[in-house]
Amino acid sequence: QSIPPSRPSDPPIHVAVVACGGEDRVEETIVNIKALVLFSTIRITFHVFADEELQPSFRDRIKKWPSYFRRQFTYTIYNITYPEDGQQENWRRLFKPCASQRLFLPSILQDVDSILYVDTDILFLSPVQEMWGEFDKFNSTQLSALSPEHEDPRVGWYSRFARHPYYGVTGVNSGVMLMNLTRIRNAEFKWQQMLLPLYVKYSLNLTWGDQDLLNIIFHYNPEMLRMMPCNKNYRPDHCMYMQMCASTAHEGVRVMHGCRRSFHIDKWPTFRSVYAAVRDF
Ligand SMILES: *[C@@H]1O[C@H](CO)[C@@H](O)[C@H](O)[C@H]1NC(C)=O
Ligand SMILES: *[C@@H]1O[C@H](CO)[C@@H](O)[C@H](O)[C@H]1NC(C)=O
Ligand SMILES: *[C@@H]1O[C@H](CO)[C@@H](O)[C@H](O)[C@H]1NC(C)=O
Ligand SMILES: *[C@@H]1O[C@H](CO)[C@@H](O)[C@H](O)[C@H]1NC(C)=O
């Protein structure tokens, strides 16, 4: 399999992932990138934000891939950084750098129009162009797309436990996020200036870090968010007791999210097997 040279009509596909922690995060990120490349027929530009000590191992693993595979994408590795906006000390003091890195992508990636952000524990099982096509469905006020955190408010986490505002009836999950960075940069509400005061106000009530902040932001600005179906961010919660995600019935799982460490433990054999299959390819 070899991808033909880019055509002018191809959208420039940018994917961002943030890897911090131990060596297992490197493996997860590598498997994540491999699946994205494997299922796509278009070149992808990856922006990998990683702890400095993980960067060599990451480069080494990519070098070992066959050249025909490596030709299908380019990547840049970045240190975890805060924007140079005079607020660095506050950011540093308040935020865990890794968890919040994605919130700063609009100012860090100044030259990038739009990005697909993925958590490390994401596996694409479908061409990335399909996900990217969601951007074409944005109306004039939408600047991001996410899937619901849950399908049923009676058993959803936010609807039962959250101590802060959240989007819609079940909140949103931030593991797979489309961001039109141009729109976020141009938005009247000044994304970056908003983060710090929100964080200060709600810090004692946040459980899931930046995902909670995103829920608060889109609670107050619902016109800016587009919802994606659950099969574009399919999690163990969707099949723990029964099938909760209707969009899988005809389209299957397009993007799998191995949260709750489901790629690594025995509790959800399907999640673990899919991960192992891509890892071992
Ligand atoms: C990351 O930071 C270190 C020191 O702070 C620097 O030496 C290195 O070049 C940086 N790496 C990247 C990818 O920017
Ligand atoms: C993002 O928004 C800008 C401004 O509205 C638009 O020009 C651009 O085409 C959008 N990007 C994508 C991928 O839709
Ligand atoms: C945080 O949670 C407490 C307890 O539920 C609530 O009383 C308080 O209003 C919350 N803080 C904010 C800023 O919403
Ligand atoms: C775009 O869609 C969102 C979500 O459905 C909606 O709240 C918003 O009003 C729409 N914007 C326009 C300009 O129609």
Image: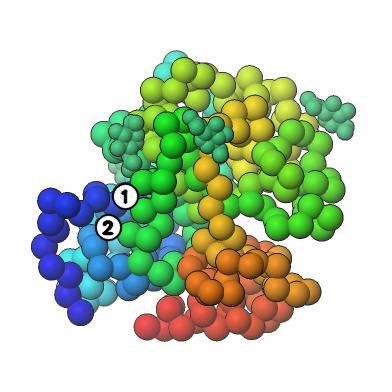
Work out which quarter of the rendered image holds the N terminus and state it.
bottom left
Q: Identify the residue at horizontal 64%, vertical 83% (top origin).
A: 269
Quarter-of-image position of residue 3? bottom left
Relative side of 52 to 66, left or right: right
Task: Categorize mark 1 by other alpha carbons within 10 Å: few (<14), some (14-19), many (20+).
Answer: some
Q: Is residue 145 visible?
A: yes
The disc placed on residue 44 is: 2
Work out which quarter of the rendered image holds the C terminus and state it.
bottom left
Q: Are marks 2 and 1 in contact (CB under 8 Å)?
A: yes
Which structural element holds mark 1?
strand
Q: Earlier in the sequence, mark 2 or mark 1?
A: 1
Amino acid type, label 2: Ile
Which structural element holds mark 2?
strand
Residue behind mark 1: 14
Q: Identify the residue at horizontal 76%, vertical 34% (top origin).
A: 164
Amino acid type, label 1: His
Q: Identify the residue at horizontal 65%, vertical 66% (top origin).
A: 245
Q: Nearer the viewer, residue 32 or 184?
A: 184
Relative side of 103 to 69, left or right: right
- x, y percent for residue 15: 36, 52
Q: Residue 256, relative to residue 85: is it above or below?
A: below
